[in-house]
Amino acid sequence: MSAYALIIVLYGGRILIGQKRSHFMAVNGKNPWVIPGGTVEPSEAPKVTAQRELREETNKNIELNRFIDLGTVTDIFTARTYFIFSVVLSKNEFCKKIPLHYEFKKFKWIFIEKLTWRKMLAIHKEWLPKMLNTREQLTLITTSKSETR
């Protein structure tokens, strides 16, 4: 069984999504949009993985206590477990253009209500809308955190 930590990165009602390069993740010849994340290493806590992957993929070094645990999702077909976290960036941390990591072709910030699900990775389509369906909670978190920084 493999485990992954995924991070919903938020700022001002927007979510950060990235498109992987084709040799990292091509599905039917297309490159779906994904949220940052990666494999939980042996003896590494999922929250630490989330922090490490966010730093590696976006160059954002966020304190561990700012990662909010949203729960886990298990893909019954692949037996993969996904640990889902969210982090809200402050105004000072927000950067419209994210430096590209070698795995990614591009990143973009998109308003949550304008997210196009058909272009997302299939497994993300299953659970991400449910996580974002608690939009009131995410909006409150986004607003309160960004206003206090």
Image (cartoon, rainbow, N blue to C red):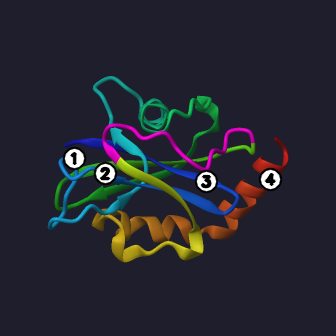
Other-residue count near label 3 (Cα within 10 Å), few / some / many at <14 / 14–19 / ≥20: many
Marks 3 and 1, how far apart at CA: 24 Å
Pick whichever of labels 2 and 4 is earlier in the sequence.
2
In front here: 82 or 111?
111
The magenta span reads 92-104
| Above or below 118: residue 62 | above
Magenta span has 98?
yes
Rendered image quadrant of residue 1: top left
Q: Position of residue 109 (x, y in %)?
A: 55, 58
Taking 72 as reference, is 118 above or below it? below
The structure residue drawn at horizontal position 75% and vertical position 60%, both measured from the top left corner, is 140
- Observer-side mark, 3 or 1, equals 1
User: Mark 3 highlights which residue?
Assistant: 10
Left or right: where 8 falls relative to 89: left
* Residue in view at x 39 percent, y 38 percent: 101
Judging from the image, what secondary structure is the residue with disc 3 in?
strand
The three-letter code of the residue at mark 4 reads Ser
Q: Which residue is mark 2?
A: 20
2 and 1 marks in contact (CB < 8 Å):
yes
Q: Compare marks 3 and 2 and give the one earlier in the sequence.
A: 3
Categorize mark 4 by other alpha carbons within 10 Å: few (<14), some (14-19), many (20+): few
Q: CA distance from mark 3 to mark 2?
A: 19 Å
Observer-side mark, 2 or 4, equals 2
Q: Main secondary structure of the magenta part?
A: loop
Looking at the picture, does residue 90 appear above or below residue 79?
above
The label number, if any, that marks residue 94 in the structure image:
none
Circle 1 is placed at which residue position? 24
Decide if residue 102 is on the left or right side of residue 114. Answer: left
| Residue 6 screen position, x and y as percent | 42, 47
Q: Which residue position is annotated with label 4?
A: 144
Disc 3 marks a residue whose amino acid type is Leu
